[in-house]
Amino acid sequence: MGLTIDDQLAIQQLAARYNHAIDSGDSTGFAGAFVESGVLDAGELVVEGRTDLEQFGKSFHTSARAPRHVATNLVIDGDGDQATLHAYVQMYALVGDPPRQEITASGVYADTLSKVDGKWLFERRTFTSDA
């Protein structure tokens, strides 16, 4: 049957809230975007479980000046309580003096999601860098 429009919109909102949370240092909101045993896989960096995800979220926003994740071309597929999300992603940050926004990372997301108690969450968010 496929996903409803409401499910697709909820997944888009999840992706947007994830970006705002990680960029602003909202570690609780960031970790809360994942199921309890969720995984963030960024190649050499793999973070597993909400506790470790929250710790990662606390430190990330200070690792770059004014980080801004921008996810585009979201492709959402699924059925029932399972879905996948594929998207392009660029991360901007302030660099230099005087500071200017530059793309500091780009790549793709390939995600698996589950609907838990009526709420969409990431099971696994995989980032593959273009570099």
Image (cartoon, helix red, strand yellow):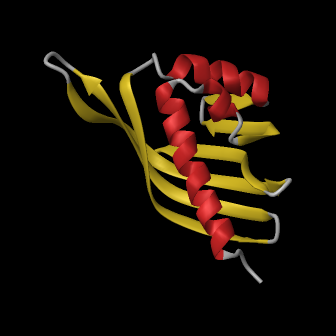
User: Residue 89's spot in the image, x, y percent?
Assistant: 44, 48
Question: Most extreme residue toward the right, as rendered?
Answer: 117
Q: How many marks?
A: 0
Query: In the displayed structure, does residue 50 sit left or right of residue 127?
Result: right
In the image, is residue 82 above or below residue 125?
A: below
- Residue 99, placed above or below residue 8: above
Residue ID at (73%, 79%): 2
Q: Quadrant of the C terminus?
A: top left
- Residue 9 appears left or right of 4: left
Residue 4: image quadrant is: bottom right
Residue 82 in picture, x, y percent from top left: 79, 63
47 on left or right of 116? left
Residue 59 on image: x %, y %: 55, 16
Occupied quadrant, residue 39: top right
Residue 131 appears anywhere in the view: no
**Quarter of the N terminus within the rendering:** bottom right
